[in-house]
Amino acid sequence: MSTNKFIFITYIAFLGFGCEDNMKQSGYDEVLLDDVSWSLSEPLSPNLDSFIKSLVSYGIDIEFEPDISEISQPLNFKTALITYKYYEEIEKDNYSYWVEENVTISIAGEKGVLTEVEMLYLIHKSVRKHFIDYDSHYFEGLQLLDVEKNVPEYEVLLGS
């Protein structure tokens, strides 16, 4: 009986390592922008250059300045799917309750391949309306969920 348990655990561990290696071999980072601090409730910027200035200013204010040269490096994809969730308050029949909303958006590089900073800029433009008065509006990175047809899908990680 204990031999079967060992074989099963070894098999699961082997499967896990294989999946991780496949993601790394495909060139998609498991986590992006986890070393950048940003609030998704910040005012929108009219363009990427203005956004970068706001990102640096925000980082200086909280003493966690981002490495713009690092997050401006081109990634190996032009489009990505971004998944996030938020809660919306619904009122019905004098009763208020919260509903979880799951959203997936598609973003594309404006000049070809995406960079991490451009991803954050495009995400901010798309999701800000949901996080203006939301407790968990602090961006904490992107977690790779899946890759299909060379298009990665990342989940937005949030904190409060």
Image (cartoon, grey):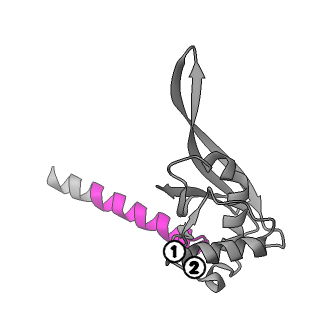
Majority secondary structure of magenta residues: helix
Instruction: Please tell me which residue is depicted at 62% across the width and 55% down the height of the picture.
Output: 41
Q: Is residue 142 above or below residue 113?
A: above
| Element type at mark 1 | loop
Instruction: Please tell me which residue is depicted at 51% across the width and 74% down the height of the picture.
Output: 35
Q: Nearer the viewer, residue 108 or 58?
A: 58
Residue 15 in magenta stretch: yes
| Element type at mark 2 | loop
Q: Quadrant of residue 109?
A: bottom right
Within 10 Å of the Cα at label 1, are there few (<14), some (14-19), or many (20+) other Cα atoms?
A: few
Location of mark 1 (residue): 35
Disc 2 to disc 1, C-alpha distance: 7 Å
Task: Identify the magenta region.
Answer: 8-29
Q: Nearer the viewer, residue 144 or 4?
A: 144
**Where does residue 68 sit, x and y in percent of width and height?**
64, 82
Location of mark 2 (residue): 66
- Residue type indicated by callout 1: Asp
Of labels 2 and 1, earlier in sequence is: 1
Q: Quadrant of residue 57?
A: bottom right
The answer to whether residue 73 is visible is: yes
Instruction: Please tell me which residue is depicted at 41% across the width and 62% down the height of the picture.
Output: 16
Within 10 Å of the Cα at label 2, are there few (<14), some (14-19), or many (20+) other Cα atoms?
A: many
Total label count? 2
- Residue type indicated by callout 2: Pro
Furthest-bottom residue in this view: 69
Instruction: Please tell me which residue is depicted at 57% across the width and 43% down the height of the picture.
Output: 86
Q: Give the left or right position of residue 26, taking residue 111 as reference.
A: left
Q: Is residue 7 above or below residue 73?
A: above
Is disc 2 in contact with disc 1, using a CB cutoff of under 8 Å? yes
Q: Nearer the viewer, residue 9 or 134?
A: 134
